[in-house]
Image (spheres, coloured by chain):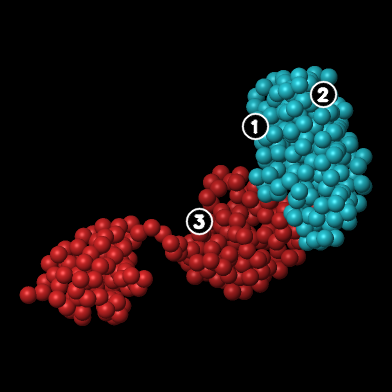
Amino acid sequence: MTTPRVGLVIVSHSKKLAEGVAELAGQMAPDVPIIPAGGTSEGGLGTDYEAVTHAITTADQGAGVVLLFDLGSAQMTADMAVENLENPAQATVAEAPLVEGAVAAAVASAGGQNQAAVAAAAEGRTAVEEPRQPDAQTEITLTNEVGLHARPAALLAGAVADLDATVTIHKNDQQADAASVLALLSLTARKGDHLTVTARGPQATEAITKIQQLTKNNFNEQ
Amino acid sequence: MGCGTEGVIAALTAAAEVVSAHRDELVELDRVIGDGDHGENLQRGFRTFVVAVTRSVPPTPGAVVKLLASTLISTVGGAAGPLYGTACLRAASSLGDAPELTPAAIAAALRAALGGVVARGKAEPGDKTMVDALTPAVEAAQKALENGADIHGILVAAADAADDGAAATIPLVARKGRASYLGERSAGHLDPGARSTALLLRALADAT
């Protein structure tokens, strides 16, 4: 069985527009369910709450749905349809330009991204939240003679390599990925330098503990 | 007229007739600064409601208003559907299961309706929308309640304030909805949503 893709629903005042956007976005993502929900039930211009609700159900393969809309009242209809789902978390309304947003969302979905990432792609954002607080952090002072030179840097990188954590070493306003020896060397951290270590991920605390241990042991220098 | 379930159905049926009587006026107002479907959409919604409410009479005033909400949401194709629909949903929740409506319940329901419109449409007073009619109506209803008015008195105060609020949208430049695309050209025209809000409140006042 193929992995389910995030479905898209195109909410437009116009049946033709919704179908056209679905056609265009589908060209880039043949495996993604893209369901147009355009026009009123009588075939006029407007949005149809029931049709949007139905389209969400049709578009959902099990990976959730992202809705895109054309104009303000289509957004209101989309919002209402999502709020009134049995499980509102099943769908997200993306605030995006309709055509570009639909194409970006379709490509993201085809690439196996999740519902939040597909919505983010439509909105031209990346789903990675940059300024997140680290899960663990510590301050260290280098007391070994050579500072963060090649061998200590390799030890440090090795210490965090197998852990499920993203560790960053900060020296003043410079920062380096602790898993990269080259990045660590570029910090040119010497004996006596104060460094901040931040870690994110399930094993963030373990990573911090390991680094504290290494520093305390002067990176096993003789 | 009493304000039990039958009274509420009668008042909303009267409102439906007012919407039909003013259909062309609303279409014309909306044609100038919007997409021209407001009168037709509202008429369709209220007509469907009148049929639905006769077919199966809801047990409480709140349930009647909830039926109106779901009917408007599913049959009005324009912005009025989600906006009036959310307004009525909130009003229905505010009314709860009470079998008879009190003046305080009416004032609270109006306030809840305004909350629904603002939550759905994100409009503020001065944006040239139905909020400009409904906000003063809610305030006037509250004041009337505090002065001891009955349901009719509260709705008359609300309708009067909504009329003034709607008229005050004429010089405004629209900042929400389709009219906002017109920018300065939206000034000098009565907002159709504010007008329909005032018409509905007047219809309810006349029916109580």
Q: Is residue A109 above or below residue B205?
A: below
At label 3, counting other C-alpha atoms closer than 10 Å, the crowd grade (few under 14, some 14-19, many 20 or more) is few
Q: Is B4 placed left or right of A62 in the picture?
A: right
The amino acid type of the residue labelled 2 equals His
Dot 1 and dot 2 within a common chain: yes
Residue name at image x 82 percent, y 52 percent: B172
At label 2, counting other C-alpha atoms closer than 10 Å, the crowd grade (few under 14, some 14-19, many 20 or more) is some
Which is more foreground, mark 1 or mark 3?
1
Name the residue carrying label 1: B93
Residue farthest left in this picture: A222
Question: Could you say which is closer to the camera, residue A139 or residue A214?
Answer: A139
Output the chain of dot 3: A
First-in-chain label (1 vs 2): 1
Name the residue carrying label 2: B152
Name the disc covering residue A62, or none.
Answer: 3
What secondary structure is found at the residue carrying circle 3? loop
Percent position (x, y) of residue B33?
85, 56
Residue A72 quadrant? bottom right
| Chain with cyan colouring | B
Percent position (x, y) of residue A214?
17, 67
Dot 1 and dot 3 within a common chain: no
Visual hue assigned to chain A: red
The amino acid type of the residue labelled 1 equals Ser
The amino acid type of the residue labelled 3 equals Gly
Residue name at image x 56 percent, y 44 percent: A86
